Image (spheres, rainbow, N blue to C red):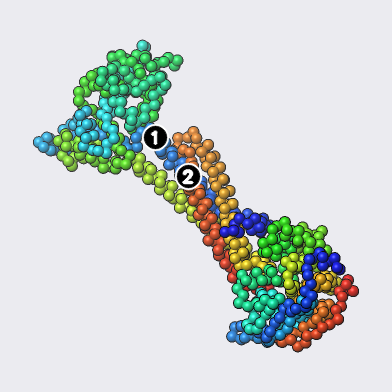
Amino acid sequence: MSYCGILFGIQPNTNKTNMIEIKDLHKSYQMGSNSLHVLKGINFSVKAGELVAIMGSSGSGKSTLLNILGMLDVADSGEYKLDGVTIKDLNETKAAKYRNKFLGFVFQSFNLINYKTALENVALPLYYQRIPRKERQEKALKYLEMVGLKEWSHHLPSELSGGQNQRVAVARAMASEPKVILADELTGALDSTTSYEVMDLIQKINDQGNTILVVTHEDDIAHMCKRIVYLKDGVIIKDEKVKQVRASEYV
Amino acid sequence: MRFLFDKNTWQEIFGSIGKNKTRTIITVIGVLWGIFIYIVLAGASQGMDNGFEKNFETVAKNSIWAWSQSTSMPYAGYKTGRSLRIKVGDAQTLANRIPEIQYISPVNTKGVFGGEAALGVRGMKSNSYPVYGYFPVIAKMATQKIYDGGRFINEEDIEQARKICVIGERTQQELFDKDEDPIGGYIRVDNIYFQVVGVHKFTQTTPFGTDGDIYMPYSTFKKLYNTGENAQYFTIAAYDDADVVQVEKDIKSVLKSIHKVHPDDERAFGAFNLGEIFNKIMGFAEGITFLSLVVGLATILAGVIGIGNILLISVKERTKELGIRRALGATPKEVRILIILESVFLTTIAGIIGIILGAAVLSIINQLTQDIEFPYTNPTVPIPLVIGALAVMVILGTLIGLIPAQRAVSIKPIDALREE
């Protein structure tokens, strides 16, 4: 898949520095008079080029962790460094700029804008980077081609299958050339065959040196990553490297 | 303000409103209707205003006619019921004592207020016509439309008491043949030959004018009918900025002092005050204009509030979309601008279409009222009012857009994304 590297123009971070560094992260939610302590001191780091699964049952705090990593939510205490930049004191404007520059999101429910075509959806993060329209569309088309949907670029999300929609979402996450891609239950709404197709795509993107974090509760999906972080009741109970199962074996 | 001129911003906005067509159309209709009503009402009231103005355009709007009657109170040794006669010389006294008077001219008539009309004869044709003795200055107070080739009475006519006359349109039709040129022709008025120097078109220049009459120089009239220094009435025009009610009072009190009439005698002198009536009518027209302005603006306001309402609902519908945009890097400011610009853009477009439709309807009304006897002319809305209305709409559109825009950014992106 070496042609992809040329295509993406991404330089893999070879010196394996820490892309994500988290120290003693705490987060609790106020539920009326009760305080719900969701994250109880998370410490972990992700090196550039890793493909990490965060696993846990519902209520384990994995989504909260991902939201904090994605700057959609703010931790109560602790330190968060993204590619050496300390993320703190975020207001909405700053958070939006960081998200735009550093992060790509893939969601369980795709979260595509329903009145925009696949191409326009992929081009949207680039719009917020103030990239001119023509360049935006060229780039978006390039990433759609990468996920194998070039022929579908002018279709609305409603005209595409679930797997196709998720591939559009992946292309959109890639389009802004982020430092880290965060995927929240990205196969949650897909059947297993389609899930493996999408995971195959994720693996290929990772092969190019992109750092990817996948939140999942499915064991088979987790084992398609290179490392699994098990979360339970707001703490990491296990953090292990695994032998990657290639999704292409199932496709 | 850079975003306003950013092509990308507008592409985003066109994308958003173009792809939600039903919402866009419903939104637009509210404001469109508002501005349409406003334009039609404002134009119609302006048309009525113009119509009234036109009805009065041939006569000085500050005109007053004053005449003498008989006393109703004894004064200075005179008994009550004394019949009064205004004199030619009174005109000069009035002009000297009342600075607001621009023009004043005595008029004598025969056959207008009772009395026998003059017999006009030409060859075998004859009829009776009211006769007016005029000074040339009359033309300055009541526009005289004289047909081509003719002229009005001039100063020399007065000095030499020439036997010339200006005849009405109907007089011409009755005494002359159709293809005959009346100018230079002679008619006999009460057995004296007069040369016709002009034919006047009928215009309502006095409350009692007609088109079948004969005008002659004042001095000629005086000789012909032995009126001496007596005058029948004064035609008076006050300056435009004068208070016509006060001028009327002054005229009467000066006349009373000249003719030794009790200052409180209300019946000694009569007057017809066109200025006062004109002011009342124009006041009415202004009231209508004001009313239409208020109604129109209220309708626009209702329309804009409608836009705000629909945008508020649409923001709720679009919570997820806006959450996605923010997750992808839209700053709160960019989201706010997107919503406000949508509001302003829709309001402006609706406004422009409304103005065009309103103008179209006004022009149709204008066509329909062209030939009917109704004070309605040239219904237009002044450009400043149109621009003002547009400005009001853009401002209101911005203000009303602030509410949904604020709502859009008040939801955290994480909550917005969770919304299903």
Query: Compared with residue A228, is residue B418 higher up or lower down, i.e. above or below?
Result: above
The reply to whether residue B188 is in sight is yes
User: Is B271 situated left or right of B358 in this image?
Assistant: left
Question: What subunit carries mark 1?
Answer: B
Residue that mark 1 sits on:
B57
Tell me the residue at 63%/83% (across/down).
A77
Q: Residue placed farthest to the top in the image?
A: B123
Residue that mark 2 sits on:
B382
Mark 1 lies on a secondary structure that is loop
Q: Residue A113 appears in which quarter of the rendering?
A: bottom right
Q: Residue A203 appears in which quarter of the rendering?
A: bottom right
User: Is B257 situated left or right of A182 in this image?
Assistant: left
The reply to whether residue B111 is in sight is no
Query: Quarter holding the N terminus of chain B?
Result: bottom right
Q: Residue A135 appears in which quarter of the rendering?
A: bottom right
Q: Is disc 2 surrounded by few (<14), some (14 to 19) or many (20+) residues within 10 Å?
A: few
Q: Residue placed farthest to the left in the image?
A: B77
- Residue type, mark 1 in image: Glu
Q: Residue A105 carries which label?
A: none
Tell me the residue at 81%/71% (across/down).
A208
Q: Residue placed farthest to the right in the image?
A: A249
Mark 2 lies on a secondary structure that is loop
Q: Which of pointers 2 and 1 indicates the residue nearer the eye?
A: 2
- Using the numbered discs, state the Cα–Cα distance from disc 2 to disc 1 in whole angstroms: 21 Å
Residue contact between numbered discs 2 and 1, judged by CB atoms under 8 Å: no
Query: Compared with residue A130, is residue B253 higher up or lower down, i.e. above or below?
Result: above
Q: Residue placed farthest to the bottom in the image?
A: A237
Is there one chain holding both mark 2 and mark 1? yes
